[in-house]
Image (cartoon, helix red, strand yellow):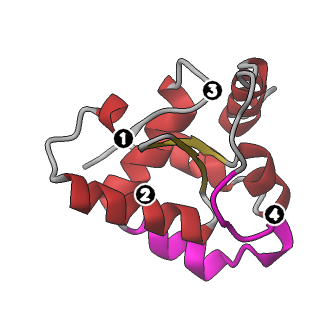
């Protein structure tokens, strides 16, 4: 029986990368991912929502922060996305003036098996 994270891996892998994808912004390598950094980033409910939504509702290869529909100042969202990227949860690429994000599903499943299953099954209280 496939877990939610395995399902997400299959789904996100099925979304083909567009042509001429820019290089990702700086991020930790898989072997540099630290559980305390990942869990610290996920401790914030907004960040947990961002990762969960990217995993379960993604409809394209990557998404801008506007896709989420959050009623928050851009500076606040920028801070949250940067924290997720620096912890190694998301990969961001710069497309002109916008940054687009996607979950590092394969990397996280390799380093912390079962973590994304927990994220996928989370529901805000």
What crowding class fits label 4: few (fewer than 14 Cα within 10 Å), some (14-19), or many (20 or more)?
some
Q: Is residue 69 left or right of residue 116?
A: left
Looking at this view, is 68 or 93 the one in front? Answer: 93
Instruction: Residue under label 1, please give it.
Output: 65
Whole-angstrom CA distance, mark 3 to mark 1, is 14 Å
Instruction: Residue under label 2, please give it.
Output: 81
Q: Which stretch is magenta? A: 24-43
What crowding class fits label 2: few (fewer than 14 Cα within 10 Å), some (14-19), or many (20 or more)?
many
Identify the mark at residue 61; answer none if there is no mark: 3
Please give the name of the residue rendered at 53% of the width and 18% of the height, measured from the top-left corner: 59
Whole-angstrom CA distance, mark 1 to mark 2, is 8 Å
Who comes first in sequence, dot 4 or dot 2? 2
Instruction: Residue under label 4, please give it.
Output: 111
**Residue found at the very far front of the displayed protein:** 96
Kind of element beneath mark 1: helix
Whole-angstrom CA distance, mark 4 to mark 1, is 26 Å
Q: Is 61 drawn above or below residue 94 in the view shown?
A: above
What crowding class fits label 3: few (fewer than 14 Cα within 10 Å), some (14-19), or many (20 or more)?
some
Figure disc tally: 4
């Amino acid at each position: 029986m496939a877990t939610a994270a395995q399902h997400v891996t299959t789904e996100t892998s099925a979304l083909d990368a567009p042509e001429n994808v820019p290089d990702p912004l700086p991020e930790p390598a898989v072997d540099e991912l630290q559980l305390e950094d990942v869990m610290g980033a996920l401790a914030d409910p907004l960040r947990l929502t961002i990762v969960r939504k990217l995993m379960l509702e993604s409809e394209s290869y990557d998404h801008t922060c506007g896709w989420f529909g959050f009623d928050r100042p851009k500076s606040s969202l920028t801070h949250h996305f940067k924290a997720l990227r620096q912890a190694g949860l998301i990969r961001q690429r710069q497309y002109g003036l916008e940054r687009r994000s996607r979950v590092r599903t394969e990397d996280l499943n390799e380093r912390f098996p079962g973590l994304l299953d927990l994220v996928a099954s989370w529901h805000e209280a």
